[in-house]
Amino acid sequence: MTKILVTGAAGFIGFHMCRYLLEAKHEVFGLDGLTDYYDVELKKARLAQLEKYSNFSFDQSMLGDIESLDRAFDSSRPEVVIHLAAQAGVRHSIAEPRAYLVSNIIGTFNVMEASKRLNVQHLLMASSSSVYGTSQDTLLSETTPSDTSLSMYAATKKANECMGHSYANIHGLPTTMLRFFTAYGPWGRPDMALFKFTKAILADEPITLFNHGKMYRDFTYIDDVVQSISLLITKPPESKEIVDQVGRVVPPFRVVNIGNSRRVSLLEFVDALEEKLGKKADIKYEKIQPGDVEATQADTTLLKDLTGFTPQTHLRDGIAAFADWYVGYYGAKENIR
């Protein structure tokens, strides 16, 4: 049994991560601020599921509140920290950039400081495929240049990677950055496409596809995401000496893509959802929005090399699981397949 602290425990990925670890009999300490960026009742419903486990404990704290955060770390004494809490949303970061500085930069710094102070064995932190920005590479690998952020959200995630590298270098803190590629599935966020499209189609309301539908994503099912993270927990990066004229030392730091390695068009995505719901969508087409990336597709070679695992849940199976959850949770009356 490992003592694991998960920030963002009431969030989409955080909730699934906690539940996976609890089922594996780890001692899990959840931390979440329960902010109102989206429906707090959904976050509380996720939390209620986790509180059924005797090996789960929870503290409601904001990452910017250093005293509360330090108390949570001191009381839980984690061996591993999985930092998933963040202010999410590419488009929201254009309207409210300061929120991203406070949560994603200062909050992450506080988590890193606490992890360093307690000498945790492995710090795993959420990044995003958004950091790849304007890269024209068809298949995005961890070595693909990622210095052309298109949104404040992406910029803060890239900054988190740089911060993580510096702490690994200076303090020897083993750190893994997780570049998520469009996670989706049951209990998902209301601001994400699958949730919004399902809600609109069932209500006979139009949906909007930007860039006239010519958008492509590497959709990664949530079960694959949390399994990938769980397998990486026991694979902390190590320092390595490089024999050269400078005598450099590579810090215990790595970046890992977490994706399905399949590029899917939004039109194919909508078609799969229509098939499951048994209803056609009323589609409105618009130009691409500021901050949006046209296409993502993960090279997951490193993930497979490290863990032997490759995410492979088929899109239609994942969408079906989400739709079944949505109808069950919200009590929709429409018949779905």
Image: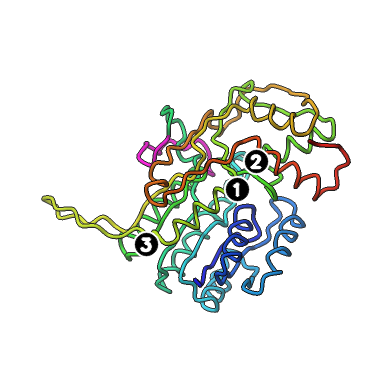
The vertical placement of 334 against 63, above or below, is above
Residue 74 placement (x, y as % from top left): 51, 78
- Mark 1–mark 2 CB contact (< 8 Å): yes
Residue 156 placement (x, y as % from top left): 49, 48
Give the number of the mark in front: 1 or 3.
Answer: 1
At a point 63% along the width and 23% down the height, the residue shown is 213
- Residue at the limit of the structure toward the right, as seen here: 333
Question: Is the magenta region chiefly helix, strand or loop?
Answer: loop
- Residue at the limit of the structure toward the left, as seen here: 245
Q: Earlier in the sequence, mark 1 or mark 3?
A: 3
Task: Provide the residue designation for mark 3.
Answer: 174
What's under tag 3, amino acid-wise?
A: Pro
Task: Provide the residue designation for mark 1.
Answer: 222
**How packed is label 2: few (under 14 Cα within 10 Å), some, or many (20 or more)?**
many
Q: Is residue 261 magenta?
A: no
The vertical placement of 140 against 21, above or below, is above
Distance between the Cα atoms at labels 1 and 2? 8 Å
What's under tag 1, amino acid-wise?
A: Ile
Q: Earlier in the sequence, mark 1 or mark 2?
A: 1
Q: Is residue 145 magenta?
A: yes
Element on which disc 3 rests: loop
Distance between the Cα atoms at labels 3 and 2? 33 Å
* Magenta stretch, residue numbers: 140-153
- Which numbered disc covers residue 318? 2
